Amino acid sequence: MKKRGFEVITDYQNAAITLPQRATHHAAGYDFEAAEEVVIPSIWKSGIIDAVKTLTASEQIHKKIKPVLVPTGIKAYMGEDEYLQLANRSSNPLKRFLILANGVGIIDSDYYNNPDNEGHIMFQFINFGLTDVTIKKGERIGQGLFLPFLKADQDVTNAARQGGFGSSDQPQQ
């Protein structure tokens, strides 16, 4: 019986995707790689300076400074009382000016095989550097750690997952 692990999603079956691995014997996190080349544009090219000057941001500027999703081609399975925490590589902010837009990603156990995207794990990056950053296919972009979690005594959640990013805050139909 499988406890936890990784699989390649259907869309990337023939894309030579490497399953996440720990780099050393004592490493806590599994290294994730980019499934394809992605350019993360600098936020300074997006009109953010103009928005700050006027203290308003048009819808067009909001779209330009939106985080960029970097696909991994990976989905994760785990126990119902576990989650996969996604974290940035420590070198990304220091050397490449890349930060995770959501700080830390949370992959719930019911995200696996969800109907919207098969549970495809993606990292959300913002580039606060002065130039665009290109992430190449196969480049390590972040880490995933399997962790347990606890539930409150009053927990009565019955909702089933209906999709991917941000789906748990959408009204159920």
Image (cartoon, rainbow, N blue to C red):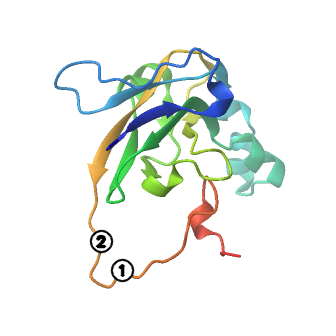
User: Is the residue marked by circle 1 packed among few (<14), some (14-19), or many (20+) residues within 10 Å?
Assistant: few
Which residue is denoted by mark 1 in the rendering? 155
- In which quadrant of the rendered image does the C terminus lie? bottom right
Q: Please tell me how many numbered marks the rendered image carries.
A: 2
User: 110 or 63: nearer the eye?
Assistant: 110
Which residue is denoted by mark 2 in the rendering? 151
- Residue at the spot x=22%, y=27% of the render? 27
User: 11 or 30: nearer the eye?
Assistant: 11
Q: Are marks 2 and 1 in contact (CB under 8 Å)?
A: yes
Q: Is residue 41 visible?
A: no
- Residue at the spot x=68%, y=44% of the render? 66
User: Is the residue marked by circle 2 packed among few (<14), some (14-19), or many (20+) residues within 10 Å?
Assistant: few
Q: Which mark is residue 113?
A: none
| Quarter occupied by residue 4 | top left
- In which quadrant of the rendered image does the N terminus lie? top left
Q: Position of residue 14 (x, y in %)?
A: 64, 18
Kind of residue indicated by mark 2: Lys
Q: Secondary structure at mark 1?
A: loop
Q: Position of residue 157 (x, y in %)?
A: 45, 78
- Residue at the spot x=50%, y=30% of the render? 98
| Quarter occupied by residue 67 | top right
Q: Secondary structure at mark 2?
A: loop
